[in-house]
Amino acid sequence: MSEFRQKCIGKKSLVGSFAAIPHAVAVEVMAPSGLDFLCIDWEHAQISRDMIENMVRAADVHRVPAMVRVPGHQPEAIAAALDSGAQGVLVPRISTAAQAEAAVKASRYPPQGERGVGPGRAAGYGYRIPEYLAQANARTVVAVQVETAEGLANIEAIAAMDGVDVIFVGPGDLSVSIDAIGAKGADKLNAAIRTIIGVTIAHDKAAGIFCAKPEDIAQWVAIGVSFFVLASDTMFLGAGAAANYAAARAELARDDRR
């Protein structure tokens, strides 16, 4: 078992971030920050399939585990992400136990799953297939994202599915799906998230959630969440630019007053 998967299923507190800028340079800038992992956002960012591999390669250089949020739960996308060398996948919009099972099967080789064998980067371009097959199932993190009203209704069955390592809450999509947007829906959304987390932990699975800012983490770690995706490279870039611009303007104002 890889150290990353061992930490995930062992519920060690992990803080990662989304990598949404479609270039290896952004990964190389983020990787030395101390983050426990990076999640390349193939679902929402404008990242091409060949760029995924370069971004995973950049993370490997800095020995930071990279996983990929795939664009849906199609087996082909999951296979492509794992063939690139990613240590896991985050599969979005999982609303039923059948979808969770399909995500597991697409992520694992037989007899645990149905992933196809190919000569990708992960298997040394065909030169290390036997070695890779021997360890891939134990090393691959399978995280499923519950973010719909249907997923909330089916959380017991999803959490009971063998092979799922992490159940990850997507607060944004969940708030839309259950009609709990904004301040008026805050209590309803909070209750739904707590239900998902509670059921996940009851089934001895690791619970994860997206947090836009560090201050959001405390309320969730208090109820057992151990897997956090904190903001993204684009969010950090924007916040850093805004903060430094404000600081520069403050210095200019101070100079004007002298």
Image (cartoon, rainbow, N blue to C red):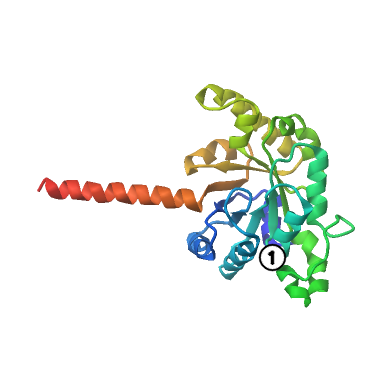
Counting other residues with Cα less than 10 Å from the Cα at mark 1, is it few (<14), some (14-19), or many (20 or more)? Answer: many
Quarter holding residue 92: top right
Q: Which sits in the foreground, 191 or 252? A: 252
- Three-letter amino acid code at the position of disc 1: Gly
Q: Which sits in the foreground, 224 or 235? A: 235
Toward the top, the furthest residue is: 184
Residue 35 visible in the displayed image: yes
Quarter holding residue 81: bottom right
Q: Residue at x 21, y 50 (%)?
A: 251
Provide residue 4's location: percent of width, then percent of height: 67, 58
Residue labelled with disc 1 = 85
Q: What quarter of the picture does the N terminus occupy?
A: bottom right
Q: Residue at x 61, y 24 (%)?
A: 188
Toward the left, the furthest residue is: 258
| Numbered-mark total | 1
Q: Is residue 235 above or below residue 114?
A: above
Q: Residue at x 74, y 74 (%)?
A: 125
Q: Which sits in the foreground, 80 or 158? A: 80
The answer to whether 210 appears left or right of 97 in the picture is left
Provide residue 211's location: percent of width, then percent of height: 54, 42
Provide residue 30's location: percent of width, then percent of height: 50, 59
Q: Residue at x 48, y 59 (%)?
A: 33
Toward the right, the furthest residue is: 111
Provide residue 238's location: percent of width, then percent of height: 42, 49
Residue 222 visible in the displayed image: no
The answer to whether 212 appears left or right of 173 in the picture is left
Q: Is residue 202 above or below residue 24?
A: above
The answer to whether 74 appears left or right of 3 in the picture is right
- For label 1, the SS is loop
